[in-house]
């Protein structure tokens, strides 16, 4: 199932495109058609799907004389970009007295006045680029110059050269009639052969007026009606040449819907194929072991935990293979749920595998299981890299013979020589760290075992439907009752002494603390050295009265294990660590989390780290030490914009941490700041690349598309009905190779 998602983008771009060849269009000769083909545009139909990157909208076109309103009038302070259309009247590069740099001034003129545009960078290039007398559209947020007159600084611009040719709109008229003009993406190469924004405008005008019917509209009327969608031909025509803003909005909505719909259709087919074509294991026997375990727990399961356990056991008892995602914020108690499911497998005579993303975590799971299982007669094994050869052989044999009933491990479990006697259940912890690919690899080690994927990354629903669209989802949406919300604060470098005093107080009261240092790949060596040096300093100079442990990824497995168990036993009061402790570590007595250089961490990483405390009944604290100046220092020399954005983002990340402990809210902000591709790593997550649809912002439309797609597959599982023929064809075109997996027809 994973392969599908991974190959998707390549499949789509390699797909064949029926329809008229490009050269049917006047103005596209061999040269241009070759250039377009190199971009993946092979037919007129492909060309019609080459969408504008932006529009010139009359609503934002302003007469120069009216710009004053943005400086001192009713629009002052409104940070909105406006557009002016004017002729280049004068160009002048001169040295600025203030900055002693060469600055370019270009004066534009329209029938109401003159506007100065200023460039500080690329002066020579812009000076050569514009000709006196040429028509430009410039867009910017109006600013005031020294004398309080409006000016544009580094405006965006479009050249409207040749605007009055017959197949181009008359700009004067346009200004009054109010059409919206598309702006197309182009490159220097394309511009050389006349395919600048205007060039594209010309060929697209033809493509739309003469060939729009090649598009057709495969979507069933019923779906269009229910989802309130415009016809596809109309949408494609309008996305290029919208009559008005509402028309454009309807067009965008339709096209986004299609992108989401075909993707959901693929997921619906896959899900159906998994459910119907491969019989799974039907676990029949009630689990005595699970009952005993629940009775022996020192706490009551939350009602959320009980609800998801019920969902999972129902799946396991059915003869359809389980594909379930268990979602629950950090500390919500997923491990015990997984263990109960594993015991059900064991009591039915099957083996269960529990896969964790890191060795530290696998070891911790093994420790947890050991303590939960206590006296229960269950044999379990830990398999990780770096175990001695003899021990490893022994473990492998134990797995092969079926002696090991539960096997906990890292991706070492995926290796060729790991053979299970009778694998019935696979649990994958912290899914987002694994590629989707690994999910299916582990599955292949059994005869269609049930699969439970657990994640602590709370994913907004819309995204979960996409990332895990072929899985059923269970959510633990409450924390155990004894938890107090963690108190979070940001402190500056200069205030660290006070922070350490606070740590000292807490430790004296019998609590434990983490002090975490960032370790990022690009500067790993330096970071590690800094962390180790700081550990030594903390031990000697700051906390000589306590024992401090050090934990980082470069240590040997046994060393790590040793440090962790000492911290757990309370032999260490403070654990200095790099981000290796990010996921899963569970030590309820640790109540203080200090994060150094917190501005360098991502939001979900901060949330995960904070989740290491607040796991018991005591009040916990998370203190984020920030050095705002760090960004300025590190990024100096690069372009100023990035620094600013990153600095703002860092601030937003820290503020969000202070404001909320709600994992869903945090995930949302994270997605806003970084986008889904970054958050999940597009390649490994198998997220599709849409042209228009945005998984975060278009959640509602996604839900609609998903419902429509799943309903359609329910009523016509193989898309065989004549009324769905067009749909099937379009689907095959987009997702050609994936059909094998989905087993349509
Ligand atoms: P996560 O969902 O982050 O993996 P864990 O499974 O590690 O969370 O659970 C966090 C802590 O809460 C563990 O110490 C676990 O034993 C404890 N715990 C789990 N369920 C409950 C419960 N219902 N009541 C109280 N404590 C619980
Ligand atoms: Mg966990």
Image (tube, rainbow, N blue to C red):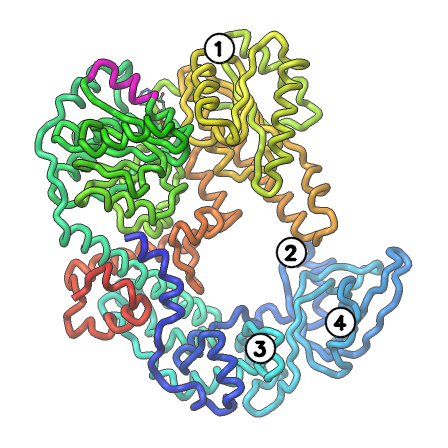
- Crowding around mark 2 (Cα neighbors within 10 Å: few <14, some 14 to 19, many 20+) is few
Task: Tell me the tag on residue 571.
Answer: 1
| SS for callout 2 | loop
Task: Please give left or right for residue 379 compared with residue 127 in the image.
Answer: left
Identified at 33% across, 27% down, the residue is 390
The residue carrying mark 2 has its beta carbon less than 8 Å from ligand 1: no
Report x, y in % for residue 234: 37, 77
Region of the chain picked out in magenta, as a range: 367-376
Precedes in sequence: disc 3 or disc 4: 4
Distance from the alpha carbon under mark 3 to that under mark 4: 19 Å
Precedes in sequence: disc 4 or disc 2: 2
| SS for callout 1 | loop
Picture quadrant of residue 265: bottom left
Task: Tell me the tag on residue 197.
Answer: 3
Foreground label between 4 and 2: 4
Q: Nearer the viewer, residue 87 or 564?
A: 564
Mark 3–mark 1 CB contact (< 8 Å):
no
Task: Please give left or right for residue 275 compared with residue 103 in the image.
Answer: left
Which residue does the numbered mark 2 point to in the structure image? Answer: 79
Which residue does the numbered mark 4 point to in the structure image? Answer: 125
- Is residue 22 inside the magenta stretch? no
Say if residue 77 shows up in the picture. yes
């Amino acid at each position: 199932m994973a392969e599908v998602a991974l190959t998707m983008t390549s499949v789509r771009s390699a797909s064949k495109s029926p329809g008229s060849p490009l050269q049917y269009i006047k103005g596209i000769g061999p040269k241009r058609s070759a250039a377009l083909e190199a971009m993946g545009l092979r037919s007129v139909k492909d060309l019609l799907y080459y969408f504008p990157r932006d529009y010139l909208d009359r609503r934002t076109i302003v007469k120069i004389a009216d710009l004053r309103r943005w400086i001192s009038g009713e629009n002052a302070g409104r940070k909105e970009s406006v557009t002016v259309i004017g002729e280049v009247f004068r160009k002048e590069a001169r040295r600025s007295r203030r900055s002693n740099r060469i600055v370019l001034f270009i004066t534009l003129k329209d029938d109401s006045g003159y506007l100065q545009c200023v460039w500080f960078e690329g002066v020579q290039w812009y000076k050569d680029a514009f000709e006196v007398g040429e028509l430009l559209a410039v867009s910017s947020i109006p600013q005031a110059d020294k004398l309080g007159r409006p000016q544009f600084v580094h405006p965006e611009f479009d050249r409207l050269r040749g605007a009055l040719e017959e197949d181009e709109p008359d700009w004067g008229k346009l200004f009054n009639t109010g059409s919206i003009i598309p702006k197309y993406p182009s490159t220097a190469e394309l511009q050389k052969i006349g395919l600048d924004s205007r060039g594209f405008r010309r060929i697209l005008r033809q493509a739309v007026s003469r060939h729009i019917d090649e598009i057709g509209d495969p979507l069933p009327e019923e779906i269009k009606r229910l989802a309130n969608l415009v016809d596809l031909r109309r949408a494609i025509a309008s996305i290029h040449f919208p009559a008005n803003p509402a028309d454009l909005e309807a067009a965008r909505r339709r096209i986004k819907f299609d992108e989401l719909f075909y993707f959901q259709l693929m997921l619906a087919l896959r899900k159906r194929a998994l459910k119907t074509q491969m019989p799974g294991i039907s676990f029949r026997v009630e689990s005595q072991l699970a009952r005993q375990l629940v009775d022996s727990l020192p706490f009551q399961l939350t009602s959320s935990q009980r609800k998801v356990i019920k969902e999972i056991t129902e799946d396991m008892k059915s003869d359809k293979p389980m594909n379930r995602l268990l979602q629950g914020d950090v500390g919500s108690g997923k491990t015990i749920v997984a263990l109960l499911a594993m015991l059900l497998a064991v009591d039915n005579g099957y083996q269960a595998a529990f896969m964790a993303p890191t060795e530290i975590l696998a070891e911790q799971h093994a420790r947890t299981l050991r303590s939960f299982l206590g006296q229960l007669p269950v044999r379990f094994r830990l398999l990780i890299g770096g175990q001695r050869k003899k021990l490893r052989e022994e473990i492998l044999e134990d797995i092969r013979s079926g002696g090991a009933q539960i096997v906990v491990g890292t991706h070492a479990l995926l290796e060729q020589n790991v053979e299970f006697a009778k694998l019935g259940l696979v649990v994958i912890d912290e899914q987002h760290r694994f590629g989707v690919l690994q999910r299916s690899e582990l599955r292949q080690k059994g005869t269609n075992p049930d699969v439970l994927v657990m994640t602590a990354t709370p994913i907004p629903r819309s995204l979960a439907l996409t990332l895990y669209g072929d899985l059923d989802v269970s959510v633990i949406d409450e924390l155990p009752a004894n938890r107090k919300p963690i108190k979070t604060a940001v402190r500056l470098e200069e205030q660290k002494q006070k922070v350490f005093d606070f740590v000292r107080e807490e430790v004296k009261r019998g609590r434990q603390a983490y002090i975490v240092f960032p370790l990022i790949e690009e500067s790993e060596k330096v970071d590690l050295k800094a962390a180790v040096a700081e550990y030594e300093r903390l031990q000697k100079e700051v906390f000589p009265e306590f024992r401090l442990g050090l934990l980082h990824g470069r240590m040997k497995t046994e060393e790590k294990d040793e440090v962790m168990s000492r911290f757990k036993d309370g032999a260490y009061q403070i654990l200095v660590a790099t981000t290796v402790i990010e996921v899963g570590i569970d030590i309820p007595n640790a109540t203080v989390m200090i994060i150094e250089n917190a501005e360098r961490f991502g939001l979900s990483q901060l949330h995960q780290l904070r989740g290491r405390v607040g796991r018991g009944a005591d009040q916990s604290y998370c203190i984020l030490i920030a050095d705002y100046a760090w960004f300025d220092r590190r990024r100096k020399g690069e372009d100023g914009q990035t620094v600013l954005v990153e600095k703002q983002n860092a601030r937003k990340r820290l503020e969000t941490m202070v404001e909320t402990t709600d994992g869903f809210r945090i995930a949302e902000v994270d997605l806003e700041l970084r986008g889904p591709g970054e958050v999940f790593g597009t390649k490994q997550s198998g997220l599709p690349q849409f042209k228009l649809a945005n998984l975060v912002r278009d959640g509602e439309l996604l839900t609609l598309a998903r419902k429509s797609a799943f309903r359609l597959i329910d009523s016509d599982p193989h898309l065989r009905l004549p009324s769905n023929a067009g749909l099937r064809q379009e689907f095959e075109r987009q997702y050609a190779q994936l059909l094998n997996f989905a087993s349509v027809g």
